[in-house]
Image (tube, rainbow, N blue to C red):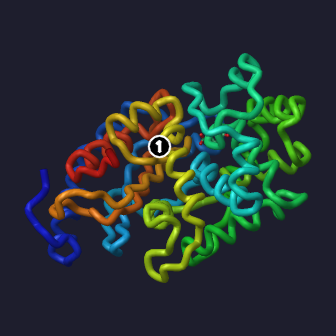
Amino acid sequence: MVQGIANWNTEQTEEWLQGYVDDWVAFFRKHTNEGKVASYIPELKKANPDQLGISIVGTNGMKIQSGDTSIPFTIQSISKVFSFIVACMERGVSYMLDRVDVEPTGEAFNSIMHLEMRQVKKPFNPLVNAGAITVSSILEGNTSDEKLEPIFELLEKLLHYRPAIDVDVYESERDSSMRNRAIGYYLLETGFLESDLNSTLETYFKQCSIELTIEDIARIGTTLANDGRDIETDEEIIPRPIARIAKALMLTCGMYDASGKFATYVGIPAKSGVSGGIMAVVPPRVRSEDMPFIEGCGIGVFGPALDKQGNSIAGIRLLKHIARQWDLSIF
Ligand code: GLU
């Protein structure tokens, strides 16, 4: 256990922590060969399964990065957190919660089963495909570009630059995603969609294809850890009650059908995507001062080799280890 220093926010301790993280990334990288890159979106098959990188940005401004840190990747399901936040900001929380539930499914992200079997009145949660596609339909605007603009504006505020869509990945998913079209038609038939199916699916495919780096993901995580306030300017970018719901959803539903295990063994809100990204949010903890990042941090992880549930196989192990070493669990 790394401990014994009261003030972690100094250059020496940053260097010291960096050494640990470098060792951990090197150690956990070997697990990448136990997983497989996503192949159901043809363009994602091109990812290099050996890659692993992590970025940690503290609400105190301390930054540690290690491994493959500079590779932009499409955020896939991580985008579901952002579209839900924007929809809540546009329509209000109660409007959204009337239309999308906040319950874990225990099923795969693209499952259609619950919608049919339990005759639910609304999709289970906004972080699985049925819920996220419903959210895309609720976003204001008639075209996908109109619907996406506030998502880009939010990301620009969070990151201080405007990210872009990886068009090849977008087209690849648009042309191959029969399952999401099936979910879309089902939602249309059951009256859940609030926009036409085409603009809804186009919005969904494009938001999944937004390209970010792990540092971007960590920065956004930090703002969420900081209850929606920018750590440099203290501007409220995401209203606190919405940031809070987003974190609760990440904790209960963010890691596919391994969400319960992740909450139990790692204990921090996180959302993963099939391209191998994970956004984790560590809120400030009430602990003895001698733990790093006690005031909270955001963590971005990228490791395209996935486990059976669709989570980065080495990324999860790395996060679990760091959470143990630094006592990051919220519990
Ligand atoms: N675009 C992907 C899909 O809908 C996102 C899935 C994910 O990252 O979980 O299949």
Is residue 38 shown left or right of residue 266?
Answer: right
- Say which amino acid is labelled 1: Leu
Q: Horizontal and vertical percent for residue 38?
A: 56, 36
- Which of 205 and 240 lies nearest the eye of the viewer? 240
Residue 167 appears in the figure: no
Q: Horizontal and vertical percent for residue 245?
A: 56, 51
**Mark 1 CB within 8 Å of ligand 1:** no
Q: Horizontal and vertical percent for residue 134?
A: 77, 43
Q: Quadrant of ligand 1?
A: top right
Outermost top residue: 117
Residue 53 appears in the figure: yes
Residue at image point 50% right, 38% down: 252
Q: Mark 1 highlights which residue?
A: 251
Q: Which of the 4 image quadrants contains residue 105?
A: top right
- Which of 103 and 212 lies nearest the eye of the viewer? 103
**Above-or-below relation of 49 to 62:** above
Q: Which of the 4 image quadrants contains residue 307?
A: top left
Outermost front residue: 94
Neighbor class of circle 1 (other Cα within 10 Å; few <14, some 14-19, many 20+) is many
Residue at image point 12% right, 50% down: 1
Is residue 182 shown left or right of residue 106?
Answer: right
Residue at image point 26% right, 49% down: 322
**Above-or-below relation of 193 to 209:** above
User: Callout 1: helix, strand or loop?
Assistant: helix
Q: How many marks?
A: 1
Q: Which of the 4 image quadrants contains residue 125?
A: top right
Residue at image point 59% right, 67% down: 238
Outermost left residue: 4
- Which of 241 and 256 lies nearest the eye of the viewer? 241
Quadrant housing the C terminus = top left
Q: Horizontal and vertical percent for residue 8?
A: 19, 70
